Amino acid sequence: MPTIPIKPFFLDGCLVARALTEPVFNPWSGKKIAEVCMAQETDVETALAAAQKAFFTTRKGSARERALILEKITALLEARRSKFVDVIVAEAGKPVVLAEAEVERAVATFRLAAALALSDGGHGITMDATAPGEKHFGYVCRFPVGVILGITPFNFPLNLVAHKIAPCLATGNTMLLKPSLKTPLTALLLAEVLHEAGVPLGQISILPFDHSFVGQLLADARVKMLSFTGSVDVGWRLKAEAARMKVALELGGNAAVVVEANSNWKEAVPLVAAAAFGFAGQSCVSVQRILVERDIFVPFRDMLITHIRENVGTGDPACRNTLVGPMIDANARRRILEWINEATCAGAKLLTPLSCEGLALLAPVLLEDVPAGCAVLEGEAFAPVAALQSYGTFDEALEMVNASSFGLQAGVFTNDITKALRAHEEIEAGGVMVNQVPTFRVENMPYGGVKLSGTGREGVRYAMEEMSEPRSLVIKRG
């Protein structure tokens, strides 16, 4: 019987083992693949004290020093691509082609941070724009906030960690990062890269620990910011507890895509399918509501069903033709099956076979005529489930998109520039993708939402702004 590895955590530049561990399971096979050491209260305190101490050094580091470390991380991450891909597939059940894309994105995240660390030297203020400012010189620079508590979810165990750590390093802050206990191995592998790249001792600690310690950290005056990516309920509760500090929340979504008859809608079909069902729909911007203009509803629906049947591979995430691997665990599948049952009992039509295999696999589910009030329309599915709806006018489509308590990203397929601009103006979301699906994201764009979907923005430059404060310098001349 193979030995199950026990993974230490990363604390103040050292790998630390503890007797208390938590198992990590492969969602596809159900097998335990590792035991990860759990940080205790004293470890969290040690990490916090080390981060505060390190900040006195990192805040004074030069832009060149920060950029060099980020460039080293980028190179080391590139050199270990295959190892990171293997770990992501194993602990997250992410299909291998999507895991490769995640590693590529993480490389870009650190590379962008290296460049941006050199770019923000501050800017001048036009002091004589008003009479009192005449004969004054004004300048603004941004300064790091201090110790940041970063919390990340299971679904992007590398790149969402990178989107916390890279801007933190670029701005000279320090961080305690708590990865998801479902997928901690990727973050701990990244810790090895950070150490090898020469990240100063104490600047970054990566600690799996019980959620009960989070409240203590939020009550500690040494922690200056919370950067949280995760569920809606947890995120807003933590914000209430962290009222005195800066908070950035990237939370859930219920993404809609609008398909107009005047668009190249046949080309949209594979994009929509991939956005709805890829990685079993386990993304905050996964397409959950597909809104199709009435004139093309039937042909679009039929083409989408055919595409799902013939081209959306479901099964072993290690296979290169797999797009839909397992959900993260059996409980996640059980929850969404209850939602599907609620919808069908209320009159929704199931357009694809309901197929469950293994411990957590669910084949793509496409529903039609889902009544208002059903969870698959109102909540965040985080599963390979999408509801197909028709609309008459573009005004109606915009109203349907906005009839949600979420507002992360939306997509609109149209060849009418006026409608594209209206969508950008009227859709209540952090981003509107035209002739693209809501899952689209590049690392240098602002990313975040409105309403229940969060507050603040990620994307390297925008996260750097969140993690710093502007400070004005005004000098009276003469």
Image (cartoon, grey):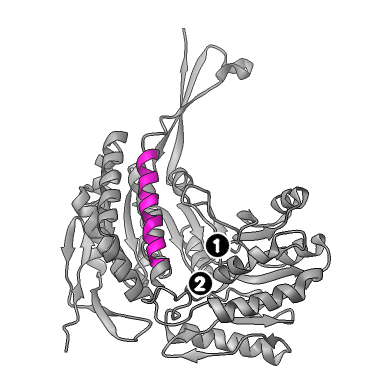
Is 339 located above or below residue 271 in the figure?
below
Q: Are marks 1 and 2 in contact (CB under 8 Å)?
A: yes
By secondary structure, the bulk of the magenta-drawn segment is best described as helix
Q: Residue 146: within the magenta? A: no
- Magenta segment boundaries in residue numbering: 98-115
Number of marks in picture: 2
Instruction: Give, as a three-letter code, the residue at label 2.
Output: Gly
- Residue 163 position within the rendered picture, expressed as x and y whole percent measured from the top left: 41, 54
Viewer-side residue, 135 vs 366: 366
What label sits on residue 439 in the rendered view? Answer: 1
Instruction: Give, as a three-letter code, the residue at label 1.
Output: Thr
Q: Look at the numbered disc 1 and give the secondary structure of its residue.
A: loop
- Image point 76% across, 76% down: which residue? 298
Q: Residue 104: within the magenta? A: yes
Identify the residue under disc 2. Answer: 278
- Image point 59% across, 65% down: which residue? 271
Q: Residues within 10 Å of mark 1 (few under 14, many from 20)?
A: many
Task: Describe residue 70's horizontal placement relative to residue 293 as left or right.
Answer: left
- Image point 50% across, 65% down: which residue? 235
